[in-house]
């Protein structure tokens, strides 16, 4: 929400009155990306997990097409191990904006015997097949993801418009150069394009934007008391998904989540940040990256993200 | 430098910049130091780098591992593609396009420079200006990157001598000005020792200028709008057709150059129809005026035919439309571009069929000489081309507008991005067009 008054020169005196603040610049760029996709694709979909990045994506899409409705549907890859607060949030947001929600269910694939539960219990790698089959069966030609290049070194190489072949595979060596803001969305039938409107955002940008825009989030992002246990150096939420095992002790702690994902591999951090300001202060001072602090699946190998992305993961 | 606090966060702007330098000029070390000394490398990332460095038997952490993200890059110890890095100080946020230095990756430097407001070109103080330096300067000039920083690195290896720095700075600046680079800032540094990168050097009293980071933090990021032709490529037509907004018809797009205000007379190209701006919505909020890189929705007073691909411009400042585009291009695809090639051309929000009519010359970046009628351009070649388009396009000279003077060529068969194009004369530095009427009526 830029106004002329807000855009007056900063204290430094080095900024022209027409220089956008970094959040305004990122917002404008993301909106441009949404509108390019709306203009060039037949059947786009927004990946929506109920996590902060996808929530910001949806907020930006709402602004991009106001006062008209968002011309995209939503797709949630449900691992079956989701936080109940997040599912409740998801359904409420979908209803509030009159959007259509597609769900690709990992549990369904396990029940049918197509996918097998992994010995370590994490379901994140299992999301790839339901996601890619849903993309094919619904004929989605553009799939918005909330991935940010600052998250992980393989993602630092990702394009804003990222072509995937008919097997949804990413080949980092065959990426199209991305010049100026001239995004190339050409693709053959069966191929699709992954689109990352938040490519240039950092975790802190996302939080600052949430604060500025007053965007509501699922409560698990704020400090709360929760029954957790220690595994692989992380606090995991106890639950029917399979934790804790013998020898893992449940305790009640004051925690919050920095990312939202599958309960089996998304860790909570000790925190007393109950407000947006407190969360922002905590992140600005943190010496750990978001993924380093809370994601077990990225630690599987040095190239875990690159390998999963090659297979079609978001 | 202090840790960022919440109070300091809101007033920041964003600077996009690119780095260029040969393999041994210390580019990775500079990038690593900028990230490290601005406290943008977090503990778990550093720990991972230390772990891998140790497992390879290296003594200290190899900061290049922070920037080489792909398996193949780590295996070969080289950078094969542009990567984007993010860091912040209390004054500004930065997007760094980290581009490989190899000659064969000219296209990657073009990619990085296309969105950059500033380029840092590294030279080794012992070697001075070499062929690769001239090549990087030429690309920065070609892409019209507004600010160029010459970082004279490894000053520690020339005893921090002022004369060594001054000679290189003088030679480079003279060359860059000849190319039409508008501004050069030369900084003597040692990326390895940390001199003048983030902290001022204790070894070079004779240098009174800014450190690299200080310069990045203070360089202006926006253009003088009064000297820009206003341009709005229409991306999408917003028509809610709801009870609340039965007649709303808005033309959505990101302002590519200049500014627009309510009440202004405008022309829609290529049709040439005219109207007046009845309203501007800035993401849902009505405003009186909007300017470059804001994404807006414009409402017109008359019900005229406007659709995606059109360009809205001030009635008094419309570019010519043409079906014959002459441009300097950088070929970015592995398959060559040849005379007679049928392609798609994407300019702004419009994609049209086109044919390559002629390739009059290929540029040799080392000495800026022209090789006449090469017949084709291969990957990383820069050359002049003449293109005939199936429909008229409103193109500006790239010298006037990086956004409406640029285009890409696309292979219609498989969608490959073939070529990056810049309309108009190359390496020319024409006087900016100034319309005195533009100065009137501003009420900020």
Image: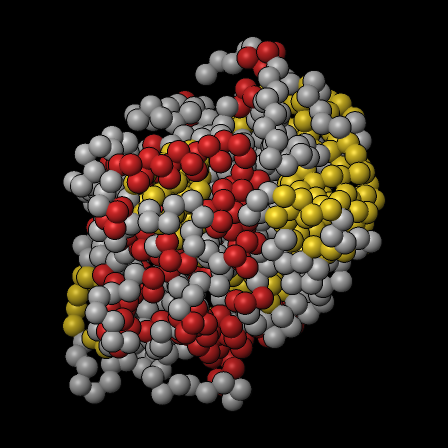
Judge from the rendering whether residue A161 lies leftward or rightward of residue B91; answer left or right. right
Closest to the observer, A180 or B250 = A180
Question: Total of numbered circles in the picture?
Answer: 0
Q: Which quadrant is the N terminus of chain A positioned in? A: top left
Closest to the observer, B366 or A203 = B366
Judge from the rendering whether residue B52 lies leftward or rightward of residue B380; answer left or right. left
Closest to the observer, A294 or B423 = B423
Q: How is the image coloured?
A: secondary structure
Q: Is residue B108 above or below residue A67?
A: below
Question: x, y percentage for residue A127?
Answer: 48, 74
Residue at position x 34%, y 44% in the image: B152
Closest to the observer, B7 or B410 = B410
Residue at position x 28%, y 76% in the image: B56
Residue B297, by quadrant, is: top right
Judge from the rendering whether residue B46 lies leftward or rightward of residue A309; answer left or right. left
Residue at position x 68%, y 21% in the image: B317
Residue A220, by quadrant, is: bottom left
Residue B255, by quadrant, is: top right
The reply to whether residue A245 is in sight is yes
Q: Is residue A132 above or below residue B227?
A: below
Q: Is residue A3 above or below residue A42?
A: above
Question: x, y percentage for residue B63?
Answer: 30, 61
The reply to whether residue A6 is in sight is no
Judge from the rendering whether residue B99 lies leftward or rightward of residue B212; answer left or right. right
Question: x, y percentage for residue B38?
Answer: 26, 47
Residue at position x 60%, y 17% in the image: B434
Question: x, y percentage for residue A140?
Answer: 64, 64
């Amino acid at each position: 929400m830029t106004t002329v008054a807000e855009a007056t020169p900063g204290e430094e005196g080095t900024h022209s009155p027409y220089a956008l603040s970094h959040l305004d610049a990122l917002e404008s760029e993301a909106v441009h990306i949404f509108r390019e996709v709306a203009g060039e694709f037949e059947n786009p979909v927004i990946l929506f997990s109920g996590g902060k990045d996808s929530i910001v994506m949806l907020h930006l899409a709402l602004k991009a097409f106001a006062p008209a409705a968002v011309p995209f549907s939503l797709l949630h890859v449900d691992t079956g191990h989701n936080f109940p607060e997040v599912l409740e949030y998801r359904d409420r947001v979908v209803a509030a904006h009159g959007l259509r929600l597609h769900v690709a269910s990992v549990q369904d694939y396990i029940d049918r015997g197509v996918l097998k539960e992994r010995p370590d219990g994490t379901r994140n790698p299992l999301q790839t097949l339901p996601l890619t089959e849903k993309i094919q069966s619904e004929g989605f030609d553009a799939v918005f993801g909330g991935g940010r290049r600052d998250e992980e070194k393989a993602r630092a190489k990702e394009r804003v418009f990222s072509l995937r072949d008919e097997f949804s595979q990413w080949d980092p060596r065959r990426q199209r150069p991305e010049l100026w803001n001239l995004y190339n969305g050409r693709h053959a039938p069966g191929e699709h394009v992954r689109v990352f409107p938040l490519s240039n955002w950092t975790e802190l940008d996302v939080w600052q934007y949430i604060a500025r825009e007053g965007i509501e989030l699922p409560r698990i992002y704020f400090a709360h008391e929760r029954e957790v246990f220690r595994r692989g150096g992380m606090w995991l939420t106890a639950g029917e998904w399979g934790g804790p095992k013998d020898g893992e002790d449940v305790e009640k702690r004051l925690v919050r989540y920095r990312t939202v994902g599958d309960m089996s591999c998304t860790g909570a951090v000790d925190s007393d940040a109950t407000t947006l300001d407190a969360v922002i202060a905590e992140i600005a001072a943190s010496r750990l990256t978001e993924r380093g602090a809370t994601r077990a699946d990225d630690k599987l190998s040095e190239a875990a993200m690159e390998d999963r992305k090659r297979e079609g993961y978001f | 430098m202090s840790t960022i606090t919440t109070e300091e966060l809101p007033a920041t702007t964003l600077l996009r910049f690119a780095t260029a330098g040969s393999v041994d000029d210390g580019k990775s070390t500079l990038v690593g130091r900028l990230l490290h000394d601005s406290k943008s490398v977090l503990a778990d990332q550093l720990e991972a780098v230390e772990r891998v460095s140790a497992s390879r038997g290296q003594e200290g952490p190899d900061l290049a591992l922070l920037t080489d993200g792909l398996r193949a890059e780590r295996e070969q110890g080289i950078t094969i593609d542009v990567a984007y890095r993010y860091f912040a100080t209390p004054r500004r946020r930065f997007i760094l396009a980290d581009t490989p230095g190899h000659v064969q990756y000219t296209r990657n430097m073009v990619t990085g420079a296309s969105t950059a407001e500033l380029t840092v070109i590294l030279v080794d103080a012992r070697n001075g200006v070499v062929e690769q330096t001239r090549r990087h300067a030429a690309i920065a000039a070609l892409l019209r990157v507004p600010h160029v920083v010459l970082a004279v690195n490894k000053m520690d290896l020339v005893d921090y001598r002022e004369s060594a720095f001054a000679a290189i700075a003088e030679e480079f600046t003279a060359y860059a000005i000849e190319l039409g680079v508008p501004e050069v800032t030369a900084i003597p540094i040692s990326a390895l020792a940390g001199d003048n990168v983030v902290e001022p050097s204790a070894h070079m009293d004779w240098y009174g200028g800014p450190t690299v980071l200080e310069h990045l933090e203070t360089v202006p990021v926006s253009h003088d709008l009064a000297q820009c032709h206003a341009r709005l490529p229409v991306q999408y037509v917003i028509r809610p057709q709801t009870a609340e907004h039965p007649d709303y018809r808005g033309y959505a797009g990101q302002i590519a150059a200049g500014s627009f205000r309510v009440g202004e007379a405008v022309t829609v190209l290529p049709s040439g129809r005219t109207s007046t701006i009845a309203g501007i919505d800035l993401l849902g909020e009505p405003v009186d005026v909007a300017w470059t890189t804001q994404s807006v929705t414009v409402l017109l007073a008359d019900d005229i035919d406007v659709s995606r691909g059109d360009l809205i411009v001030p009635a008094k400042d419309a570019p010519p439309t043409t079906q014959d585009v002459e441009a300097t291009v950088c070929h970015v695809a592995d398959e060559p571009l040849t005379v007679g090639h049928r392609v798609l051309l994407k300019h702004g929000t419009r994609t049209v069929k086109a044919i390559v009519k002629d390739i009059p010359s290929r540029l040799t970046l080392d000495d800026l000489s022209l090789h006449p009628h090469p017949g084709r351009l291969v990957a990383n070649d820069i050359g002049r081309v003449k293109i005939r388009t199936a429909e008229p396009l409103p193109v500006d000279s790239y010298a006037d507008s990086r956004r409406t003077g640029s285009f890409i060529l696309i292979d219609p068969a498989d969608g490959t991005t073939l070529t990056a194009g810049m309309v108009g004369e190359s390496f020319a530095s024409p006087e900016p067009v100034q319309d005195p009427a533009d100065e009137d009526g501003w009420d900020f």
